[in-house]
């Protein structure tokens, strides 16, 4: 069971705006799903290694150098941004 | 026979014999979409101009080229979560409603190089999160076999388009069953390749350790053709791998050993589905193929394990939709001038994401947050190891496993959408395969009244060739 305060805290961590009705709704739904997930506590996991990927991949390196992008790609990327200035993506000030 | 009934192989024959042109074939599909899609709603956007351009290009080249690729000139549909340069790619989400793909996914580059014709982008559950296509922000796709029922999901638009002959074949993606379950519910063939067999570059990430692109087709042979084209190592996806050399010719079915996991035939399965699957398995015994019951003891934990790992990855992957770089943003609005950065994040994500996306972001953020990581995420990763080992043990005894794809045939629109947990349970037979990274095929093997039922064939990593051979057997019998 998660509390309303916890639900608010998670939404804040996730940078997700939620109305108070939604906080209530998600609090109930998430609690129900988490109850189901407690099933995992029945499993004996002692000495078991975690799996993050089903295939084992070693670190894969590439040359540390910049690669020129096509002009079209740059144009698409800049056009997709809500605000742009002189070919850069503009962001609200953070200070 | 109409042109839109043709399989890839049949269409290719007619094209190289010049019995038909690609333009005729493409127009036939565009007319079919015009005629049927008002009812079925499988497409989010139709790219007629691009399709006609590509078809004409094929027709002008066919007399000059010596070798014509099997996919050349043949029209397909693409799930709207795979990027096609210059076309909108929405992931069926409001947050990407007007997003134009800036480049081609690797699978798209590969099929474009072969001269394929792209008809349009198909509907899905938002960011591929769902089992019915009802989570789309734009429309609900209907099952062509019964318009009051769902096509399955999340690749429901792709499966419905293939089933209703609105494309020759389609591409989908599968994170927990999203190719196989809609293929089963729509009565078409769907292949979820081994994790790493197909590049994920240009597939919008949902859960990166589980996602895989694959074909949805009318026949098993067509699935094989598309799979061979799109698979292979790609420097742009570091988890992609080169396929080991496959033994494809004259594979002797009689030498196969088949396992039937007992945990896939308990509680909740529709008796009609069970009967059809059991009958299919019997056909193998008639051929004197060895079939034995085996056990995958951790099966009952697969769904709970998935609902920790998947949302955790979702919460990280969907952090990129922040209202700054692309997609829906409140900072495009006039009143945004006075807003601070944090408000741009909060409001853009609140208004841009649908309910299921937000639910999974919340769940994943919780599972990864301080103090819960070990209890949820780490524990789930360890259970994932046990699930993977269950399959490894089974595959030391048998070559392939047979199970149902979905516990029920297509359900009614609206039947499960109000209860997330009930909806999640519809993926119970497909999820473990993704956790273990295995290849699996859904092949239609029967019907309950008008509703198709699919059989799932699961194999060892990179055994797609053997799975497909057995799939062809079920298709013939």
Image (cartoon, rainbow, N blue to C red):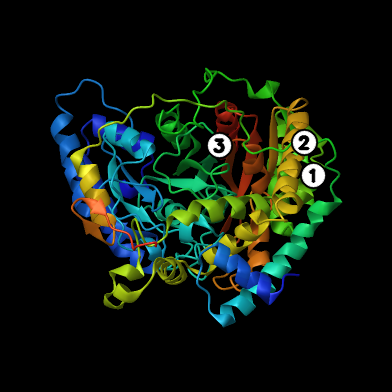
User: Pointer 3 indicates a residue of which chain?
Assistant: B
Q: Residue furthest bottom?
A: A21
What residue sits right under mark 1 in the picture? B298
Residue occupying the point 61% across, 28% down: A56
What residue sits right under mark 2 in the picture? B390
Viewer-side residue, B221 vs A1: A1
Check whether the beta carbons of the residues at disc 1 and disc 2 lie within 8 A of each other.
yes
What residue sits right under mark 3 in the picture? B476
Check whether the beta carbons of the residues at disc 3 and disc 2 lie within 8 A of each other.
no
User: Pointer 2 indicates a residue of which chain?
Assistant: B
Classify residue A41 as left or right of residue B246.
Answer: right
Q: CA distance from mark 3 to mark 2?
A: 31 Å
Q: For label 2, count other residues whose C-alpha is less than 10 Å away and answer few (under 14), some (14-19) or many (20+).
A: some
User: Pointer 1 indicates a residue of which chain?
Assistant: B
Q: Quadrant of residue B307?
A: bottom right
- Which of the two discs, 3 and 1, sits closer to the camera? 1
Viewer-side residue, B134 vs B330: B330
Residue occupying the point 78% across, 50% down: B300
Q: Secondary structure at mark 2?
A: helix
Image coordinates of residue B121 in percent, x first then y, are 34, 54
* Residue B264 visible in the picture: no
Classify residue A55 as left or right of residue B297.
Answer: left
């Amino acid at each position: 069971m998660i509390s309303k305060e916890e639900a608010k805290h998670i939404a804040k961590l996730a940078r997700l705006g939620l109305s108070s009705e939604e906080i209530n709704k998600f609090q109930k739904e998430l609690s129900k799903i988490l109850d189901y997930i407690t099933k995992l506590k029945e499993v004996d996991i002692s000495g078991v290694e975690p799996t993050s990927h089903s295939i084992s991949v070693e670190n894969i390196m590439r040359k540390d150098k910049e690669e020129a992008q096509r002009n079209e790609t740059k144009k698409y990327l800049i056009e997709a941004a809500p605000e742009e200035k002189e070919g850069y993506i503009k962001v609200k000030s953070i200070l | 026979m109409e042109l839109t009934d043709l399989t890839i192989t049949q269409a290719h024959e007619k094209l190289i014999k010049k019995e038909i042109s690609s333009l005729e074939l493409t127009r036939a599909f565009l007319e079919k979409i015009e005629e049927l899609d008002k009812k079925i709603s499988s497409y989010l956007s139709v790219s007629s101009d691009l399709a006609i351009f590509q078809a004409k290009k094929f027709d002008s080249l066919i007399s000059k080229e010596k070798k014509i690729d099997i996919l050349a000139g043949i029209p397909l549909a693409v799930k709207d979560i795979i990027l096609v340069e210059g076309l909108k790619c929405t992931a069926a989400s409001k947050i990407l409603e007007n997003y134009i793909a800036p480049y081609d996914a690797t699978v798209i580059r590969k099929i474009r190089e072969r001269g394929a014709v792209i008809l349009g982008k198909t509907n899905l559950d938002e960011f591929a999160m769902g089992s019915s296509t009802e989570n789309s922000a734009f429309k609900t796709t209907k099952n062509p076999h019964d318009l009051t029922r769902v096509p399955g999901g999340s690749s429901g638009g792709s499966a419905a388009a293939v089933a209703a002959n609105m494309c020759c074949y389609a591409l989908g993606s599968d994170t927990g069953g999203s190719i196989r379950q809609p293929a089963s519910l729509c009565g078409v063939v769907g292949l979820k390749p081994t994790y790493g067999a197909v590049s994920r570059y240009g597939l919008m990430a949902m859960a990166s350790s589980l996602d895989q692109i694959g074909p949805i087709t009318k026949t098993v042979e067509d699935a094989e053709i598309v799979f061979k084209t799109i698979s292979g190592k790609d420097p742009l996806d570091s988890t992609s791998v080169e396929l080991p050399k496959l033994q494809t010719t004259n594979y002797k079915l009689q030498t196969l050993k088949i396992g039937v996991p007992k945990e896939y035939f308990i509680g909740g399965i529709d008796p009609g589905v069970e009967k059809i699957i059991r009958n299919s398995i019997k056909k193998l015994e008639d051929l004197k193929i060895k079939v034995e019951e085996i056990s995958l003891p951790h099966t009952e934990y697969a769904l709970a394990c998935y609902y920790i790992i998947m949302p955790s990855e979702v919460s990280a992957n969907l952090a990129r939709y922040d209202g700054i770089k692309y997609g829906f943003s409140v900072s495009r609005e006039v009143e945004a001038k006075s807003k601070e950065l944090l408000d741009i994040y909060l409001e853009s994500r609140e208004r841009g994401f649908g309910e299921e996306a937000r639910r999974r972001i919340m769940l994943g953020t919780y599972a990864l947050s301080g103090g819960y990581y070990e209890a949820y995420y780490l524990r789930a990763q360890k259970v994932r190891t046990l699930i993977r080992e269950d399959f490894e043990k089974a595959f030391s005894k048998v070559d392939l496993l047979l199970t149902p794809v979905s516990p029920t045939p297509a359900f009614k629109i609206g039947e499960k959408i109000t209860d997330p947990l009930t909806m999640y349970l519809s993926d119970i037979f497909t999820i473990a395969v993704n956790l273990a990274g295995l290849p699996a095929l859904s092949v239609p093997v029967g019907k309950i009244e008008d509703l198709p039922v699919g059989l799932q064939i699961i194999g060892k990593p990179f055994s797609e060739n053997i799975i497909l051979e057995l799939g062809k057997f079920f298709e013939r019998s």
